[in-house]
Image (cartoon, rainbow, N blue to C red):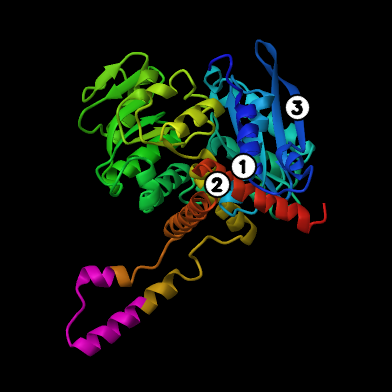
Amino acid sequence: MAEHETSFKASVDLMFDRAAATLDLEPGLGDQIKANNNVYMVQFFVKFRDGYRIFRGWRAVHSEHRLPVKGGIRFAPSVNQDDVEALAALMSYKCAIVDVPFGGSKGGLCIDPRDYNEFELERITRRFAQELIKKGYIDPALNVPAPDMGTGAREMAWIVDTYRNLHPEDINAIACVTGKPSSQGGINGRVEATGRGVQYGIQEFFRHPADVKKAGLEGGLAGKSAVVQGLGNVGYHAAKFLQEEDDVKIVGILERDGALVSDTNISVEAVFQYIRENGGVKGFPDATFVEGGIRVLEAECDILIPAAMEGQITLQNAPRIQANVIAEAANGPVTFEADDYLREHGKVIIPDAYLNAGGVTVSYFEWIKNLSHIRFGRLDRRHEAHKGEQIIGAIEEMVGKPVPSHVRDKLTYGSNELDLVRSGLEDTMRVSYQNISEIYNSRDKVPDLRTAAFVIAIEKIAMAYTEMGL
């Protein structure tokens, strides 16, 4: 990132200010919404064979206008307090944009998980969880973490077990985190959720011809070309679904050791499996390898999907970005200054605060499932199937011949948990984009989709504070 560009946290705050300036907020209310309510910094040690090691972590709470607050826990050597605060703020706005009734929070531990074996990582995770639980920063009614960079279902299982050991009397203990394994109270569809939400968000963008035209494109999503940065959980699922279900042509994939490019179509699944076996993309046989893969962000394509780290598109490379649409699957991949430049030069950005909200949306479904103590579909799946059989019987009686088997199968199918999760996520992403697009196209002071999304978030949070009399 260039020296004269703002930090991740400052970029989030400036984007907030730009949206707040279009609204008539009471004096001081905007400042209250923007500020983090509290940040807990913890330093703890873990004893290993070679001695004691000290670890530092944070849990930030941005807004408690809704409880519990929600946000992932990140394990990365780059974790710092400013980034944790920025991510907590984005969580508040994200939840408001997609109508998930949580406040925003975020956690981080300054650690490289690759430096430790599973046994060591479990001890570290449980110690960190203990410190947060003691202060109320993990609690099903107050603060509910989820996976983030460097963590996953395994770490969430360790955390929930730690919480249950400390609070065996809490009947809702399993709801203290989301993103758990399905055997530990998790929900089907959570692993794919953020990437699936990115797919649904891009699909909905292409259902709005006026917005597509502003990006200098026309037609639907099928046949469009895309470059994806980062084939981790989010980038992999987003690119895979877009390629296999929407006929999007993947012409570039950026990873840590370089990038792959192709004039035709790179198989996302094949590359993903190759990375698992070889640790990187170098040597993949069916595409051209590019050293210093960051340059492939500038490749010619219709859609650029940054799904890695924040601050990847800056004033230094923004003038060379050729993509018409930048779909922010990662948090904060575009700096504030680059955001201004790209907008002024006709690029359309589908903002992170909306586009990667699939994870928290399905986390909300998991939390509801944990509190209700019953899986989705258990009560009504067979009822749906029986109603379908009755409809088929009535049709066959009326027409005097059997219903084709493929029609019968569809009508007698009862929705399972994954079907319901995907349905709820698609509805959330579609309705939320429609609201963003309406503000973008109806308010003269709103220059882009990001500002429109922030306007929605600010208005909802401001209303909550006002209604509570705060």
Question: Above or below — where is 317 with respect to 403?
Answer: above
Which residue lies at the image location 60% right of the left edge and 50% below the top edge?
Answer: 456
Q: Is residue 397 magenta?
A: yes
Amino acid type assigned to the residue bearing label 3 in the image: Met
**From mark 3 to mark 2, how far is it between C-alphas?**
33 Å
Q: Position of residue 337 (x, y in %)?
A: 54, 26
**From mark 1 to mark 3, how far is it between C-alphas?**
30 Å
Which residue is outermost to the top?
50
Q: Which mark is residue 41?
A: 3
Rate crowding at label 3 as few (under 14), some (14 to 19) or many (20 or more) other CA atoms within 10 Å.
some
183 or 275: nearer the eye? 275
Label 1: which residue? 19
Question: Above or below — where is 454 with respect to 45?
Answer: below
Which residue lies at the image location 70% right of the left edge and 22% below the top edge?
Answer: 56
Q: Position of residue 251 (x, y in %)?
A: 27, 30
Which residue lies at the image location 31% right of the left edge and 42% below the top edge?
Answer: 217
Amino acid type assigned to the residue bearing label 2 in the image: Ala
Q: Position of residue 465 (x, y in %)?
A: 76, 52
Q: Which mark is residue 452?
A: 2
Q: Earlier in the sequence, mark 1 or mark 3?
A: 1
Q: Which residues are magenta?
A: 388-409
